[in-house]
Amino acid sequence: MIVLRAAEMGMCFGVRDALALLDRVSEPSEVTIHGELVHNPLVLRQLARRGFRSEPEVGRALPDTPAVLVTAHGVSDRERARIAAAGKRLIDTTCPLVRKAHDAARELAAEGRRLVVLGKPGHVEVEGLVGDHPGAVVVESAADVRGFGASRLGVMCQTTLPEQRAADLLARVVAANPAADVRFVDTICAPTKARQRALAELLDRVELLVVVGGRNSNNTRKLAATAAARGVPAMHVEGADDLDFEVLRGHAVVGLTAGTSTLPATVDAVEAAIRAFAAAEKVS
């Protein structure tokens, strides 16, 4: 059995930098993480053991800790103001590429355009993007596309949206609003594009794909869905213990990729387990 890694995969710099900042926090018990820092249960357990508190739902009553940490997904300016008004110290780990998406949203709104965000409703990043723009709409699928009743539309993307999905949805928005002046700003981040393109290349070379990442990680699930859409079976695991060796059995070439919140050590452990299984199969 040959194991091939995607050329680009795993933890993105935004998540890595956020975790590095947390490593420098001297009093974790005084900090509540506002939202889910990463969609990775292992990392979340490690943070809890260090003493960090967590409020997974942004927008609820603010915690009683003196400091509140905004995750790499970002929040709206309205939410930042609410945190500041409560006298909390704000620790900001918003990814720079998410900040650029917020800049794009403000620019489109300043032009008098109704904001249309291509992405997943309820996702913390998307909630942050639309939170300062009354009348903004979120489009996840073709079923969400309609005439939006505005002469000027500003269309942008959740930073982790697949490129082809964005192109398809944009075309549908334009078609459904033929009289509107539509301006599109591509806010899909470069690491996401690199990972999607690396996955497309990998899928041409493998019989089965193993995707490593949290069960509730949207971008990890999309990696598995992309493989399935290409006719390549995918196994989504959070770690080596989740591997189904009966499914692995009999495949000559197995691909390996990971979501943007997955620790390198977790990917290494999964690969090692696959290779150990392959070696044992060869001997038997």
Image (tube, helix red, strand yellow):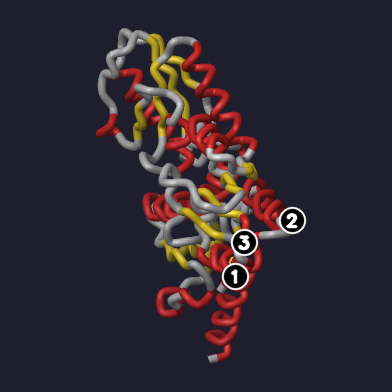
Q: Earlier in the sequence, mark 2 or mark 3?
A: 2
Residue toward you, 112 or 6: 112
- Could you say where residue 57 lies in the image, as x and y percent from the top left? 42, 49
Considering the numbered disc 2 on the image, is that residue within a helix, a strand or a loop?
loop
Residue toward you, 97 or 124: 124
Proximity of marks 1 and 2: CB atoms separated by less than 8 Å: no
Q: Amino acid at mark 2?
A: Arg
The residues bearing labels 1 and 3 have C-alpha atoms spaced at a distance of: 10 Å
Considering the numbered disc 3 on the image, is that residue within a helix, a strand or a loop?
helix
Q: Give the residue pinned by disc 1.
A: 49
Q: Amino acid at mark 1?
A: Arg
**Left or right of 249, for residue 66:** right
**Left or right of 235, for residue 32:** right
**Residue 113 occupies quadrant:** top left
The residues bearing labels 2 and 3 have C-alpha atoms spaced at a distance of: 13 Å
Q: Give the residue pinned by disc 2.
A: 24
Residue at (58% x, 47% y) in the render? 68
Q: Earlier in the sequence, mark 1 or mark 3?
A: 3
What mark, if any, has residue 96 been given in the picture?
A: none
Quarter holding the N terminus is bottom right
Q: Give the residue pinned by disc 3.
A: 29
- Could you say where residue 52 lies in the image, as x and y percent from the top left? 59, 61
| Mark closer to the observer (2, 3) | 3
